Image: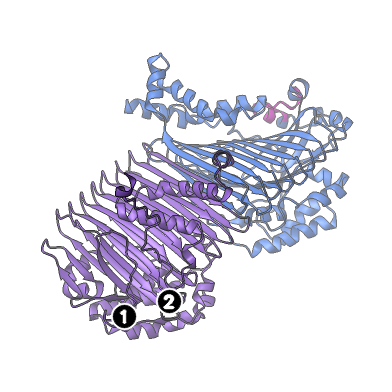
Amino acid sequence: MKMQKSQPLFQKLDQWLEESQGFFNANCQAKRAEALLKLKKLGLPDKKMEKWRNTDLSEALKFDYKLWTKEFSPAQIQNDLFQCDVHDLDAFTINLYRGRYVYQDQAIFKMENGAIIGSMAAAIEKYPELVSQHFDKYTNSENKAFDLLNTALFLDGLFIYVPKNTKLEQPIQLINAVGREENTFVQNRNLIILEEGSELTLIHCDDSYDYKRSFTNSLSEFYIGKNAKLDHYKIQNINNNSFLINSDYFYQERDSRLNTNKMILNGGLIRNEVVNTINGEGAESDILGLYLADEKQHIDNQVFVEHAVPNCRSNELFKGIVDDYAHAVFNGHILVKPDAQKTLAYQNNNNIILTDKAKINTKPFLEIYADDVKCSHGATIGQLDENSLFYIRQRGIGIDNARMLLMYAFAAEVINHIKIESLRTRIDDMVKKRLRGELSICDQCVLQCSTPEYHFEIDMAKID
Amino acid sequence: MAKDEKQILEDVTSSDYKYGFVTEIETEFAPKGLTEDTVRFISAKKEEPEWLLDFRLKAFRHWQEMEIPDWAHLKIPPIDFQDIIYYAAPKKKKELESIDDVDPELIDTFNKLGISLEEQKMLSGVAVDAVIDSVSVKTTFSDTLAKHGIIFMSFSEAVKTHPDLVKKYMGKAVPSGDNYFSTLNDAVFSDGSFCYIPKGVRCPVELSTYFRINAANTGQFERTLIIADEGAYVSYLEGCTAPQRDENQLHAAIVEILVMKDAEVKYSTVQNWYPGDKNGKGGIFNFVTKRGICKGDHSKISWTQVETGSAITWKYPSCVLAGDNSIGEFYSVAVTNNYQQADTGSKMIHLGKNTKSTIISKGISAGHSHNSYRGLVKVAKNASNSRNFSQCDSLLLGDKCGAHTFPYIDGQNSSSIVEHEATTSKISEEQLFYCQQRGISQDSAVGLIVNGYAKEVLRQLPMEFAVEAQKLLSISLEGSVG
């Protein structure tokens, strides 16, 4: 503990709290101060902790970070605003830039159907009851250092409220970007509330514009009400100098449906924590992930699914390809509580390891206290199948292309679960580019991919 | 139906632990408690050479600085290490020449256990080393073994007669200070078995050790060291029982296996320490460190275990596959009932090229028990073309018990394949219905299905043990579910 407290980061916490308190009301300020006190007592995680034994943060925490407290107006950063959108995707886009919410005229607004979309900080002011009903209710911040850090220092984030029986037809795309400033320290806090019978599609992108270092700690809480449905996509594509800690808490009520899909394409160090609490009978969840890591990247996925009630189903599928010196970690944990009979829970983690310098740690845990359940898990670490490679090469396809084809097929199992067609095509292209090593070589934007992968235009007139 | 089930469950779980008797043998104790003097007392009692005393003292000093591990999925009540007698031995009047000289009470004990030393010697051709309250009392068959150059004797005897071998290999698989309980054993181990199979010898009989805790308040700390030299083969059996007592007793053992080039060791355990009564009172705390090293190329270690006893089991038989083309196997059936807790599994460390390992683990939990599989498969970066397959199945009988799986898989090699799969379920109602439809009672049907479920492991056991293991399974489980 003493070691951690001597880190430069730890010494700045008080100063940052002071700088940021002014944005919030008294009630909120007290909560933030309290969280910081708890954090100081707990300390930041180190490798001796079971949950962190494979992810070393000492490198990430040693830099001289700056918390960005200034606000942006769109005019100011027009050139920086995220330009590469998903081809053909008709989505309502929201930008978070270095942890600040970027807006034209209104920080938060109410749609005709009653849905509220906007800045988290504005929501705390404008809809205090709604926020306090759900805020910090689904985390277990008592013992998680990064949850406490987020509660203490977050500046803004996305707030979405979807009222009863309302379906938001248009997907919402949240772009959380960093860049232009060295050593930015970003704390984002998102709260998404889906009331009974509502539906929402949310695309959450983590991006960086350039190669400037950043440390992001993003926390999202999702309340999925009775019979509600959430489609959630997360696309993580940040530069190799950036560190990202991302925690998603999904709380599900009766008969609700969750579909979350993580595409982890690039990043220096990415740690994703998914906590899915299934607290209503008949609820279902699908948690999928694809991670591609090369160079010295480190990707860590922690998935905790808690079945507290009977008759629910959960399904986890995480696949990864690890190249060069990269290190991938997966820790799945299914907890079936004593009363959660008739639970169906599956967990699967498949890895392809391409070099002897790369490393994979996978820990698929089952903890089961109910007897009438069907739970299974599988984990593999392997390579491309020799027979399949031979088969493809036999048909005149070169070794490189054959490998690419097989790796792509491996990844496709996850990609094919994306329900929005334009997004699927886009991810498909990105994965193909990534596998060929082209994605990380674009200079300005690590994500320069607004042009679709293949563009065939056949002029029918010329054929006849 | 439900009432029937309860009745049957009651009958079975309240049925006596078959081996719960106490034998009145004159026993010699060390004073209660653990200090440096205790360590010196044990060493002096065994007339040990200086280097072994140093080994013990070093371990003891190290142990005092260690903390009891808490990572296992177990609720371990605080253990008062000062409230344990660290040395208890059946009083020896004179050196024993033949089996006739053995205390008749002792012979009686072994007859009750179903291992009549004499009979075993005559009929089944299994050489037995019996360890009672931490002291080896009798090794049978030593003459035949000596003819092949096989050394099979109690550990303390080996220290006296083959000090060079013991000194050379002791602590090579489980180094001094490896973990909390092994370090405790390093300091206070009292006896155990030592076995050396020379080059090219295939041991003609199965070697067997029977461990028995008899005296009250004692802990048992035995140590087994098996060395198979080039091209040797041995099949080794281990059985354990203890009397029924209200307090918990501690058992912290070490088993070390070293396997040279082309050699093979098969180690089978039927662990049936007293599990405590149906309210979870009493029972043995079983903290065992078992590790084998495949030192040479083409060597093989196979662990088979049937774990039905002990209030708490904490045991991870491991294989370090250092030699190229070496093979490690682990087959386990762990049954927990009432308030038993088990956290057991295996570690496979692949270091050599073309190494292969298999883990088959079957957990069965009933009553209020908790049964966890915890394992590690590690493929180091130089272990090219290695292969691991792990399968961990859990069967839940009853809605108050828990079954958990905690596998750790670390891969660092691009030409190796690691596969792990696990399932958790209850006995299929279709299967039960099918059996009952054919006139098999519900009780026997459960036994049948469970035995079938565990078959993959049971068939790895040598004949003598397979029968015992099957019986144990049926005692532990029949009627637990409907």
Q: Nearer the viewer, residue B71 or A262?
A: A262
Q: Can residue B274 be seen in this view?
A: no
Magenta region = B107-119
Query: Within 10 Å of the Cα at label 1, are there few (<14), some (14-19), or many (20+) other Cα atoms?
Result: few
Residue shown at 51% from the left, 25% from the top: B452
Chain B colour is: blue
Residue shown at 37% from the left, 26% from the top: B429
Q: In which quarter of the image is residue A67?
A: bottom left
Label placed on residue A40:
2
Q: Quadrant of residue A80?
A: bottom left
Q: Where is residue A304 in the image (x, y as percent from the top left)?
A: 40, 54
Q: Which amino acid does label 1 sit on?
A: Ile
Q: Is residue B109 within the magenta segment?
A: yes
Q: Earlier in the sequence, mark 1 or mark 2?
A: 2
Q: Which of A390 and B66 is in front in this view?
A: A390
Residue on which the image places disc 1: A77
Q: Nearer the viewer, residue B395 or A324?
A: A324
- In this picture, residue B181 sits left or right of residue A408: right
Residue most extreme to the top: B439
> Please, what secondary structure does the residue beneath circle 1 have?
loop
Chain A colour is: purple
Q: Position of residue B457 (x, y in %)?
A: 58, 31
Q: Quadrant of residue A98?
A: bottom left
